[in-house]
Amino acid sequence: MSFIKPILLSVSLTFFFFSLFLGSSSAQTVVKASYWFPASEFPVTDIDSSLFTHLFCAFADLNSQTNQVVVASANQAKFSTFTQTVQQRNPNVKTLLSIGGGIADKTAYASMASNPTSRRSFIDSSIRLARSYGFHGLDLDWEYPSTPTEMSNFGTLIQEWRSAVVAEASSSGRQRLLLAAAVFYSNNYYSVLYPVQAVANSLDWVNLMAYDFYGPGWSRVTGPPAALYDPSNAGPSGDAGVRSWIQAGLPAKKAVLGFPYYGYAWRLSNANSHSYYAPTTGAAISPDGSIGYGPIRKFIADNRATTVYNATVVGDYTYSGTTWIGYDDNQSIVTKVRYAKQRGLLGYFSWHVGADDNSGLSRAASQAWNAAPATASIIRS
Ligand SMILES: *[C@@H]1O[C@H](CO)[C@@H](O)[C@H](O)[C@H]1NC(C)=O
Ligand SMILES: *[C@@H]1O[C@H](CO)[C@@H](O)[C@H](O)[C@H]1NC(C)=O
């Protein structure tokens, strides 16, 4: 039995120094996050920030003439008080200003990243804005760098951004700004690869956007919009994305798994054919079929709709008559959160906090993270 003690001692010493290291650097231990954006019309004061470690305020824009990061005048009041507002319920929550987004002009980002002067404008203005509004960090949502040159410029941009926030912290004596980016669910964007090494070296983490896999705008059949697994292994899935990034060299502790607080609604061709991959005539409920989780719960209650959880793909769907909605309910969210923790990922995020139903999904997610066993890599080694 005498051999046990030195092993335990070395494990606890390792853990002790590991904790010291974490405490003395700005490394994050967990990210439980969501995005907020003003057009959701969800009041910032209604965010239950006690359920989050980080909140993203979206979006600041890139001025394509000056290459500076700017906040639309209609958003300035809300953005400049965002941090103070969400810290009322949780003084420890950290905030990041997100730049870009799905509808931003991606050619402006490609152009900005292609030359040192415009990169400098972007970087310096982003840091000034984050500091003047009181954010703890910055998040770049360039969707997406889509040629090898753009990917390489994206890598250069984030490396310069990292050097600049390090320099700013030492000259201002303040804690370094966090740097994150929202990226494609896979490191392989239609055969163009992300510069994973630059990502790993420069960013505190990346948000993997593991959703929008199926939607009426690009799929005539129903499907799970944000499957964690694809049983055929041929299509997109959260797990395939996570594995691709990690195999390409991203440390698991820099990956944050995303899931949607919205679903997609289709009009079924035949009310009796209502499983995955059923034929449809297109979108239902809204022009692109997107519908928030809150309204989905209302649809279910109003129509006494049938709900199905598919544990193979990890996704929910509901249908009534010819309306069919694929989405993530509690069980899908909880399963994804457990997956993230067990795979040793840094955490999870959702798009977007305003689409939740009385914070139900966020509460389920936060509880699931706390309850899930962690990977025991320190003990095992
Ligand atoms: C879940 O979805 C997969 C993929 O469509 C399907 O093969 C499987 O039968 C479904 N499972 C259940 C229990 O419906
Ligand atoms: C989801 O979980 C939350 C937190 O546990 C709970 O408040 C909510 O009622 C659940 N919703 C459903 C539809 O089960």
Image (cartoon, helix red, strand yellow):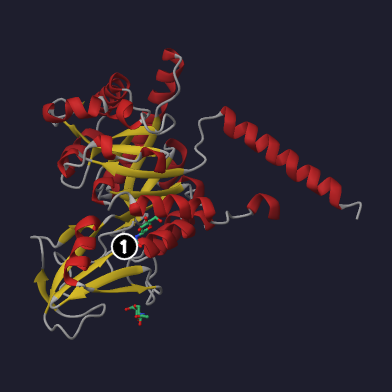
Q: Is disc 1 surrounded by few (<14), some (14 to 19) or many (20+) residues within 10 Å?
A: many
Quadrant for ligand 1?
Answer: bottom left
In this view, 100 is above or below 316:
above
Would you name the residue on which mark 1 appears?
A: 328
Expressed as whole percent of the image width and height from the top left, the position of residue 102 reads 20, 47
Looking at the image, which residue is at 20% across and 64% down? 264
- The answer to whether residue 222 of the structure is visible from this angle is no
Q: Residue at x 44, y 56 (%)?
A: 337
The picture quadrant where one finds residue 179 is top left
- Furthest residue toward bottom: 272
Which quarter of the figure is the N terminus placed in? bottom right
Of residue 286 and residue 66, the one placed in the foreground of this image is 286
Q: Amino acid at mark 1?
A: Asp
324 versus 69 height, above or below: below
Query: Residue extending furthest right?
Result: 2
Q: Position of residue 324 (x, y in %)?
A: 18, 72
CB of residue at label 1: within 8 Å of ligand 2? no
Expressed as whole percent of the image width and height from the top left, the position of residue 34 reads 33, 44
Q: How many marks?
A: 1
Closer to us: 172 or 332: 332
In the drawing, does residue 114 fall left or right of residue 343? left
Left or right, 193 with respect to 302, comes to: right
Q: Is residue 300 or residue 193 the one in the foreground?
A: 300
Position of residue 186 in the picture relative to residue 19 (left or right): left
Secondary structure under tag 1 reads loop
Q: Residue at x 31, y 69 (%)?
A: 316
Q: Position of residue 76 (x, y in %)?
A: 18, 26
Tell me where residue 35 sits by quadrant. top left
Q: Residue at x 48, y 58 (%)?
A: 338
Q: Is residue 380 visible?
A: yes
